[in-house]
Image: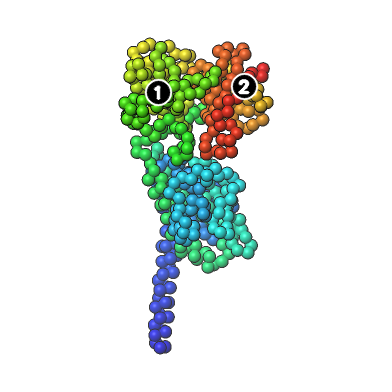
Amino acid sequence: MRRFVLKILAISTLAVIVLVPLFITVYRPWQLTWGATEEEIHRGMPGDGLVPEPTFNATRAVTIKGRPEEIWPWIVQIGYKKAGFYSHDWLDNEGIPSAERIVPEYQNLTVGDKIPLSESVDAEVRVLDRNRFLLLLVEEDSETHGAWTWAWGLYEQDAEHTRLVTRLRARLKSPVSNLILDAFEIVMMRKCLLGIKRRVEGRIIENRATGYSRRPTGGVERAAFRNPQECFGCGAIFSTVFDLFRLQRALVQGDLLPKAALREMWAPAIQSDWEADYGLGWFIGELLGRKVVEARGGTSGLMASLQYSPSEDLVVVALLNQDFMLHRELFDRLSAIALGEPWTPLFDSSSSRNPLIRFAGTYLMEDGARVELKQHDGALYMQEVGSPKRFEVLPIDDRTGFAVDPNARLIFTAGSANSPSLYVRIRSRLAQPALLTSILLRRILVRNAG
């Protein structure tokens, strides 16, 4: 028996002599920097100074085929019993499967919010720079745990690839806790990063267009990603020209709807003095003396139009990957060319100056609020008096425009700037139910306040 015990002790001692150096020199450096480059390891990230002299400092990274705005929604929704951590759910989420979709109700994260990490620990959002950085902080608890930060960073490699970098810095009180973190935390984090990668790349639409919007400070920038799972009309943005052509032919030929239903769809359904041209999902109007029905819409950085002339049986489909040019005039001009007719522009679209600038001024709403339209460097902005937010107003034609956010359509009823009136229709996104109940489809008459 004594010989057996001595043999076990000898084997254990040999294992310690061999494994401990391997753990210190090979395994630990590998797991602390898994996937990260030297530049990423030494590059500063938000929160680096919040946990001085950490006992655990790990930087990990993965390359994802996707743009930052396509990855960001998966990061901001993480959390215990929320979207999960995309890792071993039986260990970190009580067996509840991590989300396989973007969850709209978890997308409105702001600084100061709490994210549950376990039944008893919450992390506070300290830094949130959309599509770039997220920093979570768990403050030190004198009885249970030390302080730590969890930083996420998105760094573009090229137009199609992004580096997702995460950094965990912790100052733990217990040597046992530090050993467990050193030995096993990589198992969870590696699966988390690869889980995000799989989810993002599994949703990528090949050969998709990149949308662009005008930057408030000048120039253009890539538009923010719009989650296609949100419920809103996007004008067939995720279709091709041929998809929309086939849709229109199927409608006309009666393959989708009875022709009586189609006639009702293409008849004016909204009766008002400023929007009598809207049917059931279609705009009804005239172009060069011919009746035209049109389905059009857009989202961040993308616009689409399907115009149909029944008398000519002519279909014109246009898709744009930017949302700041005069798209309504462009769509009409394309249809005019297809009809073989000359086109007279409503105004000089080659000018960089917004034609609606002549309507700049202060307007009084029926509920007493005042809205200012101000020009800046050839652009026009809408801002409610007393509110810090302002929205750029982009022209549709020489007396119609729309605010980039919150989806407001502006129509000036007078062609002269001497005494213009302004009608505003605000369409809310269903992702904002509190806003929806108060202003959805509400028509507000606004008059010049002088």
What amino acid is found at the position of numbered circle 1 in the picture?
Answer: Arg
Quarter location, residue 21: bottom left
The quarter of the rendered structure image containing the C terminus is top right
Position of residue 440 relative to residue 154, above or below, is above
Q: Position of residue 258 (x, y in %)?
A: 36, 28
User: Which residue does the numbered mark 2 point to in the structure image?
Assistant: 446
Determine crowd level at label 2: few under 14, some 14-19, many 20+ residues with C-alpha closer than 10 A: many
Q: Which residue appears at 59% of the width and 62% of the height? A: 145
Does label 2 or label 1 sit earlier along the sequence? 1
Question: Residue placed farthest to the bottom in the image?
Answer: 1
Residue 386: x and y in percent read 67, 30
* Disc number for residue 263: 1
**Residue 52 in sight:** no
The x and y percentages for residue 163 are: 43, 46
Q: Is residue 92 left or right of residue 421?
A: left
Q: Is residue 45 above or below residue 254?
A: below
On the picture, is 245 further left or further right than 187?
left
Q: Residue at x 40, y 27 (%)?
A: 261
Q: Quadrant of residue 371?
A: top right
Binning the other alpha carbons within 10 Å of mark 1 as few (below 14), some (14 to 19) or many (20 upward) gives few
Horizontally, residue 432 falls left or right of residue 332, namely right
Residue plotted at (42% across, 62% down): 27
Residue beneath the point at 41% across and 69% down:
19
Q: Which three-letter amino acid code belongs to the residue tagged 2?
A: Val
Residue 321 seen in the current view: yes
The label nearer to you, 2 versus 1, is 1
Q: Is residue 300 above or below residue 41?
A: above
Q: Residue 35 or 399: which is nearer the viewer? A: 399
Where the N terminus falls, by quadrant?
A: bottom left
Helix or strand or loop: what does disc 2 sit on? strand
The one nearer the camera, 5 or 373, is: 373
